Image (spheres, coloured by chain):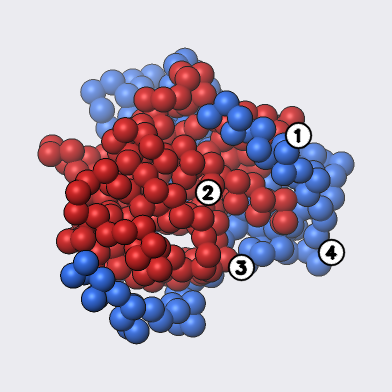
Chain colours: A blue, B red
Amino acid sequence: MASVAAFGRPALRRNLSESGSESAERRKICLVPASAHFYLFSHMANGPILLRENRYHQIKAILARLRLDSSARIVVLVDKDGQQIAVHGELGDLDTTSLASLVAGNVAATGGMAKLIGEDEFPTLSHEGAKESIHISVIGRVLLVVVFDDRSSLGLVKLRSKQISQELASAFAEIERDSATPGAKSALPFAEITDEEIDSLFSHA
Amino acid sequence: MTFINYASREINCKIVYYGPGLCGKTTNLQYIYDSTATQAKGKLISLATETDRTLFFDFMPLELGTVRGFKTRFHLYTVPGQVFYEASRKLILKGVDGVVFVADSQEERMDANIESLYNLEENLQVYGYDLMKLPYVLQLNKRDLPNVIPSPDLTSELQRKGEPVVEAVASTGAGVFDTLKAVAKQVLTELRKS
């Protein structure tokens, strides 16, 4: 066991939690019924982003309008961490879960490149294919993704996305303000989940 | 970042498999993918080099079932293990809900395990996460190889906080689902605490 001699080196044993962090962002997005109180994940460093159901439908309506105005196939709103928030359009058999994950990865990678050359981020990304194209707008912590074909054009999609971006940014600013409201704490329905219910999820695995 | 969608009644959680190069992270995901019913999984996305080394990440969504009327879906990611992919490795940890550290049990990979674990804690700190507070499982992989370090020795060196330790042979599937269950349970339990 020669390698065991390398064990327990103090430098590797130090607790990194004592060192400073560049960012303390860890948020959760909850979509809650309009009639419900806000829900709060108390262990989150900066607090969660909370979406009421009525806000969700408002966002869906914005996406629908963007799709119409830009003659796009599909419009998707994605969290920067890769979770799909809302989608509208001709989905067909499109795997929007994978799309959301890859879009987030794409934006994260280009954001890393931006920082390397001294930019904060690239606010828009475009990928043009022979038939289908994608335009991505970074709006704070969410990503607006427009999939379009030759019924539209990059210029039109950029223009409409920019117009809608302002509206979405305002909507999310309100959501963030709401989320920061004192007294937003409330128990999630999942607070009552039992160990048996959790175990039951794995009974067939 | 756990995403709870009340309109579609879904809970989505993100789990990341971390560890040194060639420790078996992708093999874990591949086994889960191969062993899961079609209706419970999405596509397995692998962003890999031409020699099948992970370049950016692997990803697969896995639906476990319904709890309290909510579909429970886990998004499983791996990071690239090779040291020089540090920039992209860090990106995958953003929004993570639970981490599996896949250790390579072979003697000659001990230093790589330690370096990767150290790197994990450092990269979590960048996002303000503390490994000590995060749902976390240590998997001791490749237990079938002849030159492995005894499990108690590996555990005493790599275990950080009394987290579950699972012995595994990812290539045959041994311990793969036990690992996933262990981390997923912690994630859901954390959700309950919230």
Mark 1 highlights which residue? B68
Name the one closer to the observer, B53 or A41. Answer: B53
The residue beneath circle 2 is: B183
Give the alpha-carbon distance from disc 1 to disc 2, as whole Å: 20 Å
- B161 left or right of B174? right
Amino acid under label 1? Arg
**Foreground mark, 4 or 2?**
2
Looking at the image, the residue that sits furthest to the right is: A35
Q: Which residue is mark 3?
A: A45
In the image, residue A23 sits, relative to residue A37, either above or below, namely: below
What SS does tag 4 mark?
loop
Give the residue at the far left of this rendering: B51
Q: Which of the chains bears the disc numbered 3?
A: A
Q: Amino acid at mark 4?
A: Gly
How far separated are the C-alphas under marks 4 and 1?
Answer: 25 Å
- In the rendered image, the vertical position of residue B174 relative to residue B105, given as above or below: above
Q: CA distance from mark 4 to mark 2?
A: 31 Å
Q: Secondary structure at mark 2?
A: helix
Proximity of marks 1 and 2: CB atoms separated by less than 8 Å:
no
Q: Mark 1 or mark 2, which is nearer to you?
A: 2
Write the residue at 32% across / 33% down: B172
Residue B143 lies, in percent from the top left, at 30, 47
Asked whether, in this view, residue A180 is left or right of residue A202, the answer is: right
Q: Amino acid at mark 3?
A: Ala
Residue at position x 64%, y 47% from top?
B188
Q: Residues within 10 Å of mark 1 (few under 14, many from 20)?
A: few
Q: Residues within 10 Å of mark 2 (few under 14, many from 20)?
A: many
